[in-house]
């Protein structure tokens, strides 16, 4: 079939539709019997083409023998057969003389089969607009702009009234009426064409298209094909083809033309499915001439021509479209057109089925609508914001609508649960069904290949198993073809990376894709237009509600404080909360008691459901950890040793004994896997349970070496910052050798201060960790370096904790002078915390330690502190008018707030 067939459009049966009353009735009886055209024709001993011609109204006087055979097959009663025969003799039904308005092509008004001339340009414009907007009213402004595109005359209101009256007379059939005649009525905003849908060709078309879309989702595509055939017969050209441009380009006309394109696309797809490509070719030729740049129409024309054996014509269509797109738009053909071209080149198309022969048993047939979503969980709470984000996939606003949404997050954070919950809640938006697959990207089982998933999806979409393409690219092209113009939801769960899911994303904009992954899938965002929805742990209130939904709200409310403590222990991780809730229900124990059981280093081992290897937090983490490269696994293990909530890139480099560039790359890998999260610019941390898991993986030897490297790095920088910001006498411990110049570490005071601020929690945590890890010298020296920063910044709680840990480390290291200094630090912290009695006691202890260490400066400072305390005590007695000054407290008149004193207490250097 070549371009000559472009003039061979579907045989007229739309405006002359009454002549097919017999065919329509016969078709209704066949559908009642539940038979396709092929099955009914085969049983009646006639050809499928003959039955199709009868039902389309092409045969007005069928042979009696044919009618008798059909009546037996369709099990018609005697009265039904008599009524059917009567329609072949009586002609059009009653009411056929009613006016009918035709706009799907040149404007025409008919009364029965007789045309009603409408010669006035103004009346044609008004009639066309009213029919175009039907069943909605046309506003006064629309009518004015349509009748007078260059501007209305001053008398336009009265002229509109006159034209409306003339249109009413045109529509009035005169004589006796068997049904209400169409007319024009006044509305508050304008005028409305009052007519039934059957009195306009657009109404007929819309009803048949809606019927075809419904039937398209049933197991019998033949019924949909017949409805589409009848719908397209009403078209005689573009909407209002002979009207003025102002009417042809009206938004309502554009929408109607788009519905025609939609019907033709569906018609072509169904023809290919039924192996009748030759029937779609004439319609497609007509449409590509009307829509010369529509790539979907050209793709189907290429496929239908190729399926008819006309490869040269198909390739010529592709070449002409490619050249035209390049010349007029400067773009290349879309993936859909390229896929069609490739299939023709490879001769991977179903051949046309001869319509006179019944289809073989293995013919492609549509099965039930895919509905593959897994069962919903018993309870789901929270995630309202994320549900709203996912609703962008079904937004009625094209500007806001998304096509692909990637839900990413850490193991156990609830990605799959969110995707399933949203998919079930929005099923009504996907009338053509839902596809679901677990890609096993992070699973004990091997990850699924895209080709395997495509085969699974193609079978679900009705493709015969023995005709599935072996090549993955060809399978993806067929997958996109079958999904064209469908409204389907595709859920791709547990994806490994972008390459695994990219072939599974359909080209049809009516389809929506939800992907869940532990990877960030940045490639899909950058190259495929996907939107990323990052999922974090539940907030405390959501976590508490989730626990209540599992154990019962009454039980959770009875132990409210314990319930909130339990969800904090679980870190807000939905998987951990669900496991804890399941254990509480199974054991029938109290929440407070279960919280006590979870305390300790082996919490992850207890967060498991007995007898279910999948229901453990550790198993979820294992899958992500084992998927990492060896160097990334090592970095992950070592990050569990962080003394604070996060670490910088340089800190991670020190921890792993790597360069900063290498550390940055490993941190990006871990962040992509959602095992590490970037808490701030350039700072990386772990979720509490993930951190516990990482610490379990690291060996004692590996941990000791890594901690030493990190703490030495902290000491080096903290000491340089202290010497730059708080210059004074050297620390009271033994010399550690020549320290590097502070100027070589920090460029100025601001950089040193900023580093101390950003690392404060890490540094405060490093001192007790170093003391407990067998690194006492590092511990007390780091404590000394930090004292000025913590005390000046008034971080008194941390200051006391650091000084106490420094004292224990100095005792363990056998350094008397360092012990005396640490005791002085502790006493100063307590003094500033207003615990005067304890502070004086510790100053006395520090004095004794300084004497044992033969440390004169330490003894003098301790004595000054004790003297200042006694003067303050005396001044506070009744009748004493003297109040202590900064001179009294410091012993040597240091200014309050100076680098050497804080609130009048001199710092030790």
Image (cartoon, helix red, strand yellow):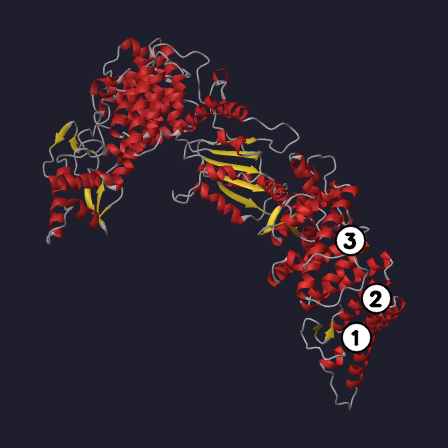
Give the labeled residue for mark 1: 836
Residue 315 left/right relative to 589 = left
> 662 or 17, which lies in front?
662
In the displayed structure, 236 sits above or below 852; it is above
Give the labeled residue for mark 3: 770
> 1 or 207, which lies in front?
1
| Label at residue 23 | none
Q: Among all residues in the image, which is located at the extreme right?
A: 852
Residue 699 left/right relative to 684 = right
Q: Where is residue 342 in the image (x, y as percent from the top left)?
A: 40, 21
Mark 3 Cα-neighbour bin, 10 Å: few <14, some 14–19, many ≥20: many
| One can see residue 855 in this view | yes
The N terminus sits in image quarter: top left
Mark 1 Cα-neighbour bin, 10 Å: few <14, some 14–19, many ≥20: some
Give the alpha-carbon distance from disc 2 to disc 3, as whole Å.
Answer: 19 Å
Give the alpha-carbon distance from disc 2 to disc 1, as whole Å.
Answer: 19 Å
Q: What element carries label 2?
A: helix
Q: Where is residue 265 in the image (x, y as percent from the top left)?
A: 34, 27
Q: Which of marks 2 and 1 is nearer the N terminus?
A: 2
Q: Where is residue 707 in the image (x, y as percent from the top left)?
A: 75, 48
Q: Is mark 3 on a helix, strand or loop?
A: helix
Q: Which residue is drawn at 27% across and 29% down?
A: 292
Q: Earlier in the sequence, mark 2 or mark 3?
A: 3
Give the alpha-carbon distance from disc 3 to disc 1, as whole Å.
Answer: 30 Å
Give the labeled residue for mark 2: 820
Mark 2 Cα-neighbour bin, 10 Å: few <14, some 14–19, many ≥20: many
């Amino acid at each position: 079939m070549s371009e000559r067939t472009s003039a061979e459009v579907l045989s007229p049966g739309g405006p002359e539709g009454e002549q097919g009353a017999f065919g329509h009735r016969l078709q209704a009886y066949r559908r009642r019997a539940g038979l396709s055209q092929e099955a009914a024709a085969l049983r009646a001993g006639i050809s499928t083409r003959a039955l199709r011609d009868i039902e389309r109204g092409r045969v007005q006087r069928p042979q009696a023998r044919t009618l008798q055979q059909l009546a037996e097959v369709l099990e018609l009663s005697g009265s039904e057969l008599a009524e059917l025969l009567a329609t072949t003799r009586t002609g059009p039904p009653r009411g056929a003389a009613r006016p009918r308005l035709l706009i799907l092509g040149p404007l025409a008004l008919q009364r029965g089969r007789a045309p009603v001339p409408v010669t006035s340009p103004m009346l044609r414009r008004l009639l066309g607009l009213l029919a175009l907007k039907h069943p909605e009213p046309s506003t006064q402004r629309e009518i004015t702009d349509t009748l007078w595109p260059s501007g209305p005359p001053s008398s336009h209101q009265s002229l509109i009234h006159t034209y409306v009256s003339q249109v009413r007379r045109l529509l009035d059939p005169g004589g006796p009426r068997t049904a209400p005649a169409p007319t024009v009525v006044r509305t508050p905003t304008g005028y409305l064409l009052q007519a039934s849908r059957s009195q306009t060709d657009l109404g007929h078309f819309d009803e048949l298209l809606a019927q075809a879309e419904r039937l398209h989702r049933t197991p019998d595509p033949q019924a949909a094909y017949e409805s589409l055939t009848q719908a397209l017969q009403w078209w005689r050209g573009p909407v209002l083809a002979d009207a003025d441009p102002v009417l042809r380009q009206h938004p309502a006309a554009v929408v109607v033309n788009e519905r025609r394109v939609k019907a033709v696309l569906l018609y072509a797809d169904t023809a290919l499915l039924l192996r009748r490509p030759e029937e779609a070719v004439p319609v497609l030729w007509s449409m590509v001439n009307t829509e010369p740049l529509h790539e979907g129409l050209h793709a189907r024309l290429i496929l239908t021509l190729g399926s008819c054996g006309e490869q040269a014509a198909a390739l010529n269509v592709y070449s002409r479209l490619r050249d035209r797109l390049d010349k007029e738009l400067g773009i290349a053909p879309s993936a859909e057109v390229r896929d069609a071209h490739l299939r023709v080149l490879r001769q991977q198309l179903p051949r046309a089925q001869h319509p006179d022969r019944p289809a073989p048993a293995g013919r492609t047939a549509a099965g039930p609508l895919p509905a593959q979503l897994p069962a919903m969980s018993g309870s789901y709470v929270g995630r309202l914001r994320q549900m709203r984000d996912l609703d962008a996939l079904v937004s009625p606003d094209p500007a806001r609508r998304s096509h692909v949404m990637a839900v990413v997050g850490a193991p156990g954070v609830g990605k799959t649960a969110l995707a399933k919950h949203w998919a079930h809640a929005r099923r009504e938006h996907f009338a053509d069904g839902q596809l679901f697959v677990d890609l096993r990207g992070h699973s004990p089982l091997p990850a699924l290949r895209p080709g395997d998933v495509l085969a699974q999806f193609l079978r679900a979409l009705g493709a015969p198993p023995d005709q599935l393409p072996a090549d993955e690219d060809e399978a993806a092209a067929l997958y996109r073809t079958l999904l064209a113009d469908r409204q389907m939801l595709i859920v791709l769960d547990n994806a490994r990376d972008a390459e695994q899911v990219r072939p599974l994303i359909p080209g049809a904009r009516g389809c929506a894709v939800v992907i869940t992954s532990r990877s960030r899938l940045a490639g899909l965002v950058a190259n495929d237009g996907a939107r990323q929805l990052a999922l974090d742990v539940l907030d405390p209130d959501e976590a508490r509600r989730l626990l209540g939904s599992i154990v019962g709200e009454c039980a959770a409310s009875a132990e409210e404080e314990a319930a909130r403590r339990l969800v904090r222990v679980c870190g807000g991780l939905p998987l951990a909360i669900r496991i804890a809730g399941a254990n509480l229900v199974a054991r029938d124990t109290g929440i407070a008691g279960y919280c006590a059981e979870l305390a300790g280093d082996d919490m992850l081992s207890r967060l498991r459901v007995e007898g279910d290897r999948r229901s453990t937090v550790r198993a979820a983490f294992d899958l992500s950890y084992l998927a990492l490269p060896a160097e990334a696994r090592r970095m992950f293990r070592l990050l569990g040793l962080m003394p604070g909530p996060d670490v910088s890139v340089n800190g991670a480099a020190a921890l792993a004994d790597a360069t900063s560039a290498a550390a940055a790359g490993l941190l990006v890998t871990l962040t992509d896997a959602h095992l590490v999260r970037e808490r701030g610019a350039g700072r990386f941390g772990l979720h509490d349970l993930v951190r516990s898991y990482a610490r379990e993986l690291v060996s004692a030897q590996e941990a000791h070496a890594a901690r030493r490297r990190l703490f030495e790095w902290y000491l080096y920088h903290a000491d340089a910052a202290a010497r730059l910001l708080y210059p004074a006498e050297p620390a009271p411990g033994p010399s550690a050798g020549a320290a590097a110049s502070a100027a070589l570490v920090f460029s100025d005071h601001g950089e040193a201060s900023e580093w101390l601020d950003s690392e404060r929690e890490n540094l405060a945590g490093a001192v007790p960790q170093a003391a407990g890890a067998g690194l006492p010298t590092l511990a007390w020296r780091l404590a000394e370096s930090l004292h000025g920063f913590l005390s000046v910044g008034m971080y008194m709680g941390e200051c006391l904790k650091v000084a106490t840990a420094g004292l224990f480390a100095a005792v363990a290291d056998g350094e008397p002078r360092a012990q005396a200094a640490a005791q002085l630090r502790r006493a100063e912290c307590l003094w500033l915390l207003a615990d005067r009695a304890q502070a004086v006691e510790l100053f006395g202890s520090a004095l004794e330690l300084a004497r044992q260490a033969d440390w004169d400066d330490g003894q003098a400072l301790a004595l000054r502190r004790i003297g200042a305390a006694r003067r303050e005590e005396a001044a506070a007695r009744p009748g004493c008018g003297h109040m202590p000054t900064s001179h009294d407290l410091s012993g040597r008149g240091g200014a309050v707030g100076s680098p050497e004193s804080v609130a009048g207490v001199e710092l030790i250097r």
